[in-house]
Amino acid sequence: MTTHLIAASILAADFGNLQRDVELLNQSQADWIHVDIMDGRFVPNISFGFPVMEAVAKHAQKPLDVHLMIVEPERYIKAFADAGASNITVHYEVCPNLHRTVQMIKELGCTAGVALNPHTPVKLLADIINDLDLVLIMSVNPGFGGQRFIENTYKKLHDVRSLSSFSNPDLLIEVDGGVGVNNASKLINAGANVLVAGNAVFSAADPKVTIAQLKSAV
Ligand code: DX5
Ligand code: ZN
């Protein structure tokens, strides 16, 4: 029995055929559609903004998992909730008032996640872990799809599991970057219960088959 979720990242889709690719995910075993928002400031790349997010939302039949790689995310949280986000994840590194930001996300009716860059230790979440629905562990430096997986991620997933298992056992632990059929099982065993996959899905000969393989990993 699988208990983990698959969040397919639309960043790796063909933006000239966005509706087609969203419909492909609708028909797949993907649980969520992962939406990467990059501002060219927190990360050295710009992805897309509200018009594209709204186009995804218009066709998506699965929850939208919005990953904000932007500075001052609190300025845009309401707009992303209005645009159809189910989960909103902000980065620890850009939130000096993280507790307030998390409460803001929840008050808008979304679940709240916090993401950690590869260099940011899990222990920094100790005093907020019980307020979170999700922790996202970056397994590449954020900014681009198709990067090589960082091996220290396994240790960080164990750290999140130990920090949360007693006080927040329902916490979603998401891993993002360089995830594929080759490492899915090991990530699940290390504590991940949401796998984000972009290139592994959209560069596959048959994306639906790859999603099914990720979903059946144990
Ligand atoms: C990277 C993004 C990821 C990206 C993952 O900054 O946060 O969600 O889409 O892409 P892959 O799976 O290709 O590494
Ligand atoms: Zn992401």
Image (cartoon, rainbow, N blue to C red):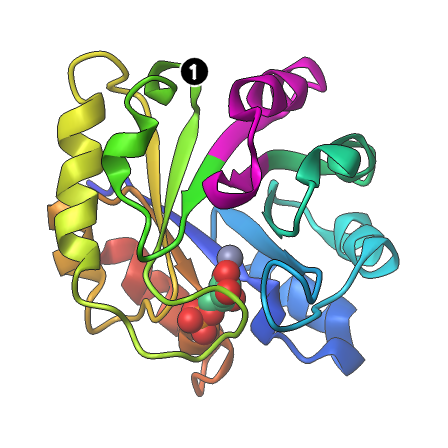
Q: Is residue 28 visible?
A: no
Displayed quadrant of residue 146:
bottom left
Secondary element under disc 1, as helix, strand or loop, is helix
Q: Tell me: 158 left or right of 57.
A: left
Residue 167, above or below 159: above
Residue at image position (23%, 12%) is 167
**Along the line of sight, which residue is nearer the eye, 128 or 169?**
128
User: Is residue 58 inside the magenta stretch?
Assistant: no
Q: Tell me: 105 left or right of 211.
A: right
Residue at image position (11%, 48%) is 189
Residue matched to label 1: 131
* Position of the N terminus by quadrant: top left
**Relative image position of residue 51 (x, y in whole percent):** 88, 57
Residue 137, above or below 205: above
The magenta-colored residue range is 88-113
**Relative image position of residue 140 (x, y in whole percent):** 36, 67
